[in-house]
Image (cartoon, rainbow, N blue to C red):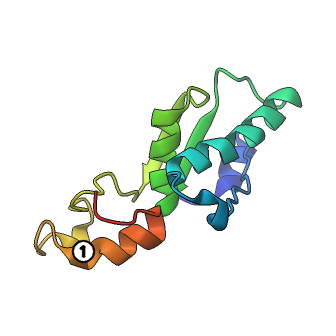
Amino acid sequence: MFNLHLLAARGFVVVIPSMPYDEAALGDRLLAGCLTDSARPAYDAVVKAGYVDPERIHVAGHSLGGWATLVLMTKTKEFRSGIALAGSRNLLSQTDDVRLRFDTIVDDSRSPGLADNYHLSEPP
């Protein structure tokens, strides 16, 4: 499922952009905004180079990349479709994580993970 060579063999252009962000410069800004700013240069570059049809660009990601896929699909208009594999969709309770299905729905034990992964200073 993660073999991107299969997509390339079928004629798809596969781009794996580097999407760094400066954690010190993040400040009060949400990580989601930084992701959209980081994805746009990759999008612009492949469109400008003529590799892709801008009306047919797809995005995919797994785990935290799945969450990033959801962000890009909801916060930008560049991507026409997307696949979010194992991405958290419910940051409030994180009940979409099957490992946590028998835990208390909302508690403070998830705060460190929210802070580390999503740069949230407190639970949503």
**Which residue is drawn at the image coordinates 68% and 47% (left, top)?**
38
In the rendered view, tell whether residue 104 sits above or below residue 34: below
Residue 87 appears at what percent x and percent y?
Answer: 40, 57
Res 74 → quadrant: top left
> Which residue in the rendered view is the most extreme toward the right?
49
Seen from this angle, which residue lies furthest top?
Answer: 55
Which residue corresponds to the image point at 24% horizontal and 74% vertical from the top-left? 99
Q: Amino acid at mark 1?
A: Arg
Please determine whether, in this image, residue 35 is positioned above or below residue 72.
below
106 displayed left or right of 73: left
Residue 99 visible in the current orientation: yes
Q: Secondary structure at mark 1?
A: helix
In the image, residue 110 above or below residue 23: below
Q: Position of residue 51 (x, y in %)?
A: 83, 31
Q: Which residue is mark 1?
A: 99
Q: Position of residue 76 (x, y in %)?
A: 55, 31
- Which residue is the extreme one toward the front? 28
Residue in the foreground of this view, choosing between 54 and 19: 19
Q: Is residue 83 left or right of residue 100?
A: right
Q: Looking at the image, which residue is at 21% across and 61% down? A: 93
Residue 88 screen position, x and y as percent: 35, 57
Quadrant location, the C terminus: bottom left
Is residue 63 visible in the rendered structure shown here?
no
Q: Is residue 79 above or below residue 116?
A: above
Relative placement, left or right, of 44 versus 34 is right
Marks counted in the figure total 1
Disc 1: CA contacts within 10 A as few (<14), some (14-19) or many (>=20): few
Residue visible at 55% across and 27% down?
A: 80
